[in-house]
Image (cartoon, rainbow, N blue to C red):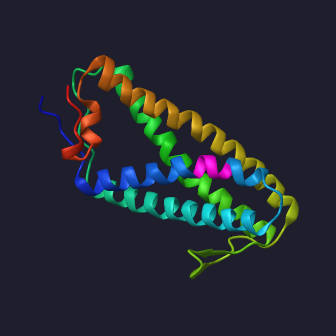
């Protein structure tokens, strides 16, 4: 099966972002349930570092994508699936930017600055405002709940194409030596 593939940098960015996002979901859910403690504050720092990293990697991924078009979808793929795939990717990109951005805004509104990996101080995006922080906390939470739903949809669609349709779609985003047998 000859399948057009994403470029190696696009594959590396995709999987790096995916690993971070899949770690951020459970970490975010776990850390908010902890009592205020040094452990909770450490986990919040890790969550913020990973979220900011996702934000910047997604910006890099979008810049890469502007100069390197993704491989075309197979012509055999029904139009509705092509439109659904495009729409899903647009929503995922929007959420990959909006979720970390609302987290950064929330931290700024609560007066908690972000030092990326404890080294690079990032600017507060808005002045301290606890009421706005509370609103942004809700927005951040609900964006991430929606994000989980769309990530699950993305994974299910990829597995469907691999295991049910057996059309090689997943191979487009796999590192060559990780290719699954058909």
Q: Nearer the viewer, residue 128 or 38?
A: 38
Q: Position of residue 78 (x, y in %)?
A: 31, 19
Task: Indicate the quadrant containing the N terminus: top left, top right, bottom left or bottom right.
Answer: top left
Q: Is residue 168 above or below residue 71?
A: above
Q: Quadrant of residue 120?
A: bottom right
Q: Position of residue 122 (x, y in %)?
A: 61, 77
Q: Is residue 131 above or below residue 80?
A: below
Q: Position of residue 110 (x, y in %)?
A: 80, 67
Q: Residue at x 29, y 34 (%)?
A: 170
The magenta segment is: 24-28
Q: Residue at x 68, y 68 (%)?
A: 42
Q: Is residue 26 above or below residue 104?
A: above
Q: Quadrant of residue 60?
A: bottom left
Q: On the picture, is 132 further left or further right than 45?
A: right
Q: Residue at x 53, y 35 (%)?
A: 150
- How many numbered marks does the figure carry? 0
Q: Nearer the viewer, residue 99 or 20?
A: 20
Q: Residue at x 17, y 34 (%)?
A: 3
Q: Residue furthest right?
A: 131
Q: Is residue 83 visible?
A: no
Q: On the picture, is 49 further left or further right than 5?
A: right
Q: Does 46 appear in magenta?
A: no
Q: On the picture, is 94 further left or further right than 38?
A: left
Q: Is residue 70 visible?
A: yes
Q: Position of residue 57 (x, y in %)?
A: 44, 61
């Amino acid at each position: 099966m000859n399948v057009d593939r994403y470029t190696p940098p696009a594959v590396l960015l995709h999987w790096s972002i995916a690993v971070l996002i899949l770690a951020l979901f459970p970490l975010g859910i776990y850390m908010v349930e902890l009592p205020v403690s040094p452990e909770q504050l450490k986990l919040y720092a890790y969550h913020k570092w990973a979220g900011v990293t996702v934000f910047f990697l997604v910006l890099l991924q979008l810049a890469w994508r502007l100069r390197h078009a993704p491989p075309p979808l197979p012509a055999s793929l029904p139009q509705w699936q092509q439109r659904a795939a495009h729409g899903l990717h647009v929503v995922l990109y929007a959420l990959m930017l909006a979720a970390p951005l609302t987290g950064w805004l929330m931290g700024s509104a609560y007066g908690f600055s972000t030092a990326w990996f404890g080294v690079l101080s990032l600017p507060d995006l808005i002045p301290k405002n606890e009421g706005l922080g509370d609103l942004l906390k809700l927005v951040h939470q609900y964006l991430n709940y929606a994000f989980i739903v769309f990530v699950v949809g993305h994974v299910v669609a990829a597995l469907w194409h691999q295991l049910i349709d057996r059309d090689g779609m997943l191979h487009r985003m796999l590192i060559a030596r990780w290719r699954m047998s058909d």
